[in-house]
Amino acid sequence: MQATLGRKGDYSVRAVLDISNHNGDRRKSREIAEEMDIPVRYLPQILANLVEHAILTAEAGPNGGYLLARPADDITLLDVVEAAEGPIRLDQCVLRGGPCDWQTSCPVHIPWNRAINALTEELTATTFGELALQCAAIATGNYELPADMPPHVIPTPRRPRIETTGAPGT
């Protein structure tokens, strides 16, 4: 089973992370697209959705661009994921297409719902201020993966650097 974001969620998280990494600096959509490998034609839809959900602010014009609508420490990973992909919840039986003779829940419903609750708690506890700090540590080679977290099984090729311009969350 894959536990990954859809394209809209992926690009939304990348865009907010880029802006968090450049805290205080207005970012043009082309800068975000280039830095985070997001298709430049698709990014305006992503950014408009984030503005609509009050995660970003936008200013038009030659000096315009995108900023966080509030400090990075006040924007959670759950805020951005749900803005992009909708609420994380269990609306139907996880045993799709199989026989479900239970009116309100099947035996799998309770442990699956507990797992969803644990996921939402972790996403709520993770802010873009923290993620920007981790990005900076990774970029400088000072990030140590926690012992209980294995690295990606399949490495994801990315740019070798992400520049940051100051203290995250400001």
Image (tube, rainbow, N blue to C red):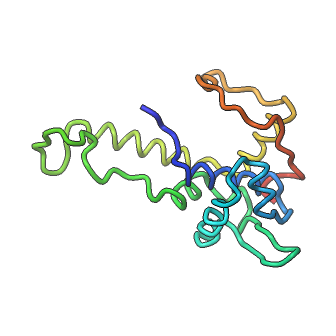
Q: Position of residue 93 (x, y in %)?
A: 24, 46
In the displayed orientation, state which residue is furthest to the left. Answer: 101
* In the depicted structure, whether residue 86 falls above or below residue 113: below
* In the depicted structure, whether residue 131 falls above or below residue 137: below
Quarter of the image holding residue 159?
top right
- Which residue is more in the foreground, 131 or 40? 40
Instruction: Please state, as top left, top right, bottom left or bottom right, where the C terminus lies in the image.
Output: bottom right
* In the depicted structure, whether residue 164 falls above or below residue 66: above
The residue positioned 24% from the left and 39% from the top of the image is: 95
Q: Is residue 43 left or right of residue 114?
A: right
Q: Position of residue 87 (x, y in %)?
A: 44, 58
- Which residue is more in the foreground, 29 or 90? 29
The residue positioned 73% from the left and 57% from the top of the image is: 72
Q: Position of residue 75 (x, y in %)?
A: 65, 58
The residue positioned 48% from the left and 43% from the top of the image is: 119
The residue positioned 46% from the left and 42% from the top of the image is: 118
Q: Position of residue 14 (x, y in %)?
A: 68, 50
Instruction: Please state, as top left, top right, bottom left or bottom right, where the N terminus lies in the image.
Output: top left
Tally of numbered discs: 0
- Which residue is more in the foreground, 47 or 123? 47
Q: Is residue 15 left or right of residue 24?
A: left
* In the depicted structure, whether residue 108 falls above or below residue 147: below
